[in-house]
Amino acid sequence: MITQERYRTTVKELLANGSIKMAIGYKPGSTPDRRRPLFIRTSEEAEQLVLDSTCVQNLSGYLVSEGLLSDEKRVGIFLRPEGVRSINILAAEYQLNADQIVIFGFDSTGREVRPLDGRSAREFSGLLNELKEKPLQIYKEPLLERIEKMNAKERFDFWQEEFSRCIKCYACRQACPMCYCRRCIVDSNQPQWVNTSSHTLGNFEWNIVRAFHLSGRCVQCGNCDRACPVNIPLRLINQRMANEVLDGFDHFAGLSATQEPVLASFKKDDTETFIL
Amino acid sequence: MTRILFSDKLDNCVAKWRSAGLAVIGPVQEEAISRYAAVEKGTDFDFGTVLPDRSLKELFFPQTEPMLRYTIKKNEIDTADFTPPQGKRIIFGARACDASGLEIDDPLFGWDYKDEFWFQRRNESVIVTIACTKADDFCMCTSLKLEPDSTKGADVLLRPIDKNKGWLVEELTDRGREAFALISEYLQESSEPALPTVVVPEKFNLDACVTWLKNPENFESKFWKEISMRCIGCASCTYLCPTCHCFDIQDEGDTYSGIRRKNWDSCSFALFTMHTSGHNPRSTQSARWRQRIMHKFNYFPGKFTVNSCSGCGRCSRQCPVDMGITETLQAISNL
């Protein structure tokens, strides 16, 4: 509650003195356990701000939608550490200018919410480097361990079963801060490169295309997984790819705004011996 | 005196229907989600959920469906039609909102072109609705002037009796009577009362909303931008909706042969209205959300005299950003 009150005051001050044109945060949802995104432009709107442990959605995707940042004015946003990583990746991929983003950082343990120091992404670099060394709990998920023990056939069957529920609503894509492409490959229809059909093959194509595209870019915020209306454990795919990239290239996505994208950069000591 | 179907006879009924050649389908709780799916015995059903995660629509209008196979030869094109899958079935335990959704969509699928895939399945399905005795925060059938025990779209209505012992049977159509004649030996006369249906509070004033939507001045209202600011533009609301019916036709294959398919499509997507020129008449998410609301409560009733919403609440229940029809219509009611 104290964190929430302090941040309300800060947001009001920054809006009043013109430092930011808007702050993106959370407000109560349609049931007590739900939170919904809030766009704060006035002090009355700031009164609706809620900050507690149920604020889990990574809001950073809103920054790159429909030209919000095109006037170069600053925008504030409430972010957990994963969200800060998203900002760094978006900056590294030239989707936004990190200096335009004012961060209201927070994290929670149990029901306790605490503020994080720093207002700009670069001030979080110490914290993010610690995260790289100390992976989150989600990294050791039982289901992930179960899948790792499967042979290739069992794993294929497992994912076939999971993807059979996919309806191609693209909630995973739309919820993902990294899926900012103006035109997604599956929406490229002249010609139609990827089938739109939501049958077994089509669902595999979609989910695998997305998994590859997110390798080395996913921050495990969980937006896709929570958005999926048919409960496909999407976090596990991206988690696995993140682990591969960490093991293979010592790359932890989103450490800084100048970090080179792992799959779009080359180092002489990369482990892929076949390249040279 | 009414007839009662006791739960402990459900196994016999399922067996009887199956032996008479009817596939039996009902609400099933799977590991990850609940949905309407084929059952083999009484215990496969799960009548405990408020309503399945996925709607009944997909059993009549699946997410992807082959229509024809084509082969392009030097001087001719060979085509072979796919026919809708044949087979009678009984859907036991539909919710009133889902059954209503089917009837709402009937005129749409039969308006100029009669969609044989839809109607073949409609004609071969017996819908047995079970009246709701519980609801959740998102249920809103009463706001749409429907009820937890609406008979719309149903061939038989069942009303639960106490302690999950069974249901009072109200046969509504010949198709329903025929299906229940098959199991008449398991029905018993009884005077046991039905449980009261759940009270679903009215959440918005539908008439006021419709009047507001019909006013052309409100098409460009700032309201649309405000209410849909957080919409991320996925299709989860449209695809889980029991009445959303938009589809796209796609040829899948190579230059010379392939399959023409009918796939779900959604007004939430920018691509839905994208012109070949690159111009998009609905270029913002707010324009797309407005379209969805206008279609359901203005254009559709304008053409078919019924709103394209049965109040199941799935749009709000499943929305990744906690939006939905309820919030929008509540906001319009309060304007």
Image (spheres, grey):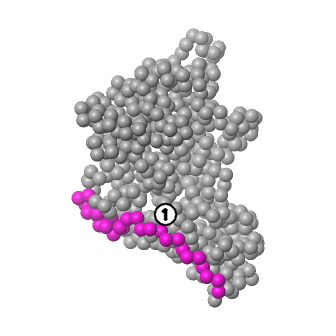
Q: Which residues are magenta?
A: B191-218
What SS does tag 1 mark?
loop
Mark 1: few/some/many CA within 10 Å (<14, 14-19, 20+): many
Where does the image place residue A71, in percent across and percent down from the top left?
Answer: 27, 32
Residue A15 located left or right of residue B67: left
Above or below — where is A56 with respect to B103?
Answer: above
B80 vs B260, nearest the viewer? B260
Per the image, is B197 magenta? yes
Q: Nearer the viewer, residue B329 or A168?
A: B329
Classify the position of the C terminus of chain A by image quarter.
top right
Classify A44 as above or below B194: above
Residue A172 visible to an observer of this rendering: no
**In this picture, residue B210 sits left or right of residue B269:** left
Q: Is residue B130 magenta?
A: no
Residue farthest to the bottom, as pictured? B1
Residue B323 makes an appearance in the image: yes
Residue beneath the point at 37% across and 39% down: A5
Judging by the rendered image, the residue that carries numbered circle 1 is B139
B85 lies above or below B183 = above
Residue at x 73%, y 67% (from the top left corner): B42
Numbered circles on residues, count: 1
Which quadrant holds residue A19?
Answer: top left
**Residue beneath the point at 47% across and 52% down:** A32
The quarter holding residue A238 reads: top right
Question: Residue A70 location, x and y as percent?
Answer: 30, 32
Q: Position of residue A268 (x, y in %)?
A: 57, 10
Label 1: chain letter: B
Q: Whole-percent x and y of residue B186?
A: 74, 80
